[in-house]
Image (spheres, rainbow, N blue to C red):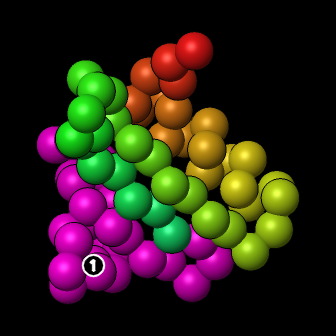
């Protein structure tokens, strides 16, 4: 989580949740699950190409998704 905060420090914070970062073309939220030992990632982008690039970038930081 610390790496995410540092790497995406230029994003606009959601004032209700500092783990949400907004950019002009995309946004993401990462949080700890309340019921499982996992991180939850929500990611949206303006187009499929941006979504794929950002997903790859975030997975590179967070690690591979659980099955």
- Residue ranking furthest to the right: 48
Q: Is residue 18 above or below residue 57?
A: below
Residue visible at 37% across and 70% down? Answer: 21
Q: Is residue 3 visible?
A: no
At label 1, counting other C-alpha atoms closer than 10 Å, the crowd grade (few under 14, some 14-19, many 20 or more) is: some
In the drawing, does residue 53 fall left or right of residue 9?
right
Q: Is residue 20 visible?
A: yes
Residue visible at 25% across and 23% down? Answer: 37
In the drawing, does residue 60 fall left or right of residue 55?
left
Q: Is residue 24 above or below residue 35?
A: below
Write the start and end of the magenta stretch as one range: 1-26
- Residue ranking furthest to the top: 67
Q: Locate the N terminus and report the quarter of the image it occupies.
A: top left
Q: Locate the C terminus and report the quarter of the image it occupies.
A: top right
Q: Is residue 8 magenta?
A: yes
Q: Is residue 6 magenta?
A: yes
Number of numbered markers: 1
Residue 45: where, in percent of width, then height? 67, 68
Residue 15: where, in percent of width, then height? 20, 84
Which of the pair 39/52 is nearer the observer? 39
Q: In which quarter of the view is residue 55 placed?
A: top right
Residue 48: where, in percent of width, then height? 83, 58
Q: Secondary structure at mark 1?
A: strand
Which of the pair 14/34 is nearer the observer? 34
Residue visible at 71% across and 56% down? Answer: 51
Residue visible at 54% across and 41% down? Answer: 57
- Mark 1 lies on residue: 13
Q: In which quarter of the view is residue 34 placed?
A: top left
Residue 42: where, in percent of width, then height? 50, 55
- Residue ranking furthest to the front: 35
């Amino acid at each position: 989580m610390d790496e995410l905060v540092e790497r995406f420090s230029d994003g606009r914070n959601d004032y209700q949740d500092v783990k949400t970062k907004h950019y002009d073309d995309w946004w993401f939220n990462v949080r700890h699950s309340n019921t499982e030992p996992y991180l939850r990632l929500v990611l949206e982008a303006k187009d499929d190409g941006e979504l794929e690039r950002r997903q790859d970038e975030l997975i590179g930081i967070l690690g591979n998704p659980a099955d």
